[in-house]
Image (cartoon, rainbow, N blue to C red):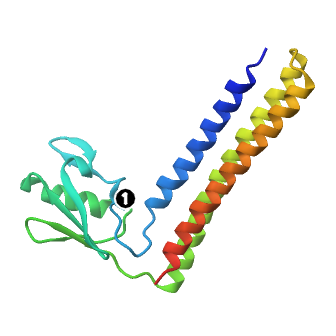
């Protein structure tokens, strides 16, 4: 027999993971304001192995339009610069020998609209994942009736599942709205 509470908890956990993935993905999108999260995907060749940028340098935002990267070992400055240029960040780094600066350009209106569309695509993927989890668990509950789960318990579990689903769809929408406001703010 199926454990309804454990099944619902597992479903909620998977939906939470979809929302967390969306949040991380949205943080990597450049909205015209400096954000160190856009460099999270950058890997640097340091002494023969590929490591995340934040393990070989201090990454900070001295102002709203600049990201500063201070390498701990000055010899790695070229490798860091190359890694940033090879990544999909899309910003050319400026190197003064000690610090690498990334100047974040102000996006045009057209670019902002493209970024909003990009965010919406990622958001839709997260919503689809949440809906897929709901569908899988609904099927599991329907099959559990044959294994001895009462129909009343199944209906109650389905209602609870729908509440969890609605909560995470709302969370995804809130994340998207916040990012869209950030992008469209000049």
Residue 175 location in percent, x, y? 57, 60
Q: Is residue 123 above or below residue 144?
A: below
Tell me which corner region of the image, top left, top right, bottom left or bottom right, holds residue 28: bottom left
Q: Is residue 74 left or right of residue 146?
A: left
Please provide percent x and percent y for residue 137.
76, 33
Q: In the image, is 131 to the left or to the right of 144?
A: left
Q: Position of residue 182 (x, y in %)?
A: 49, 73
Residue at disc 1, secondary structure: helix
Q: Quadrant of the N terminus?
A: top right
Q: Residue 160 versus residue 120: which sits nearer the camera?
A: 160
User: Left or right: 177 with respect to 78?
Assistant: right
| Residue at 33 percent of width and 75 percent of height | 104
Residue 73 vertical placement versus 135 (above, below): below
* Mark 1, residue position: 37
Residue 170 picture quarter: bottom right
The answer to whether residue 175 is above or below residue 131 is below
Could you tell me which residue is drawn at 50 percent across and 74 percent down?
183
Q: Position of residue 48 (x, y in %)?
A: 18, 41
Which residue is at 24% across, 59% downward? 59
């Amino acid at each position: 027999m199926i454990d309804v509470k454990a099944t619902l908890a597992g479903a909620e956990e998977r939906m939470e993971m979809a929302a967390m993935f969306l949040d991380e993905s949205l943080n990597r999108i450049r909205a015209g304001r400096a954000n160190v999260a856009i460099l999270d995907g950058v890997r640097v060749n340091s002494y023969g192995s590929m490591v995340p940028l934040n393990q070989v340098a201090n990454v900070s935002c001295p102002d709203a339009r600049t990201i500063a990267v201070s390498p701990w070992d000055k010899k790695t400055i070229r490798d860091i610069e190359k890694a940033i240029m090879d990544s999909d960040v899309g910003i050319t780094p400026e190197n003064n020998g000690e610090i690498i600066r990334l100047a974040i350009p102000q996006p045009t209106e057209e670019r902002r609209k493209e970024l909003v569309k990009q965010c919406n695509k990622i958001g839709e993927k997260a919503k689809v994942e949440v809906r897929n989890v709901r569908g899988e668990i609904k099927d599991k509950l329907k099959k559990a009736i044959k294994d001895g789960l009462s129909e009343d318990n199944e209906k109650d579990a389905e209602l609870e599942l729908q509440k969890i689903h609605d909560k995470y769809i709302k969370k995804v929408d809130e994340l998207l709205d916040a990012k869209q406001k950030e992008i469209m703010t000049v």
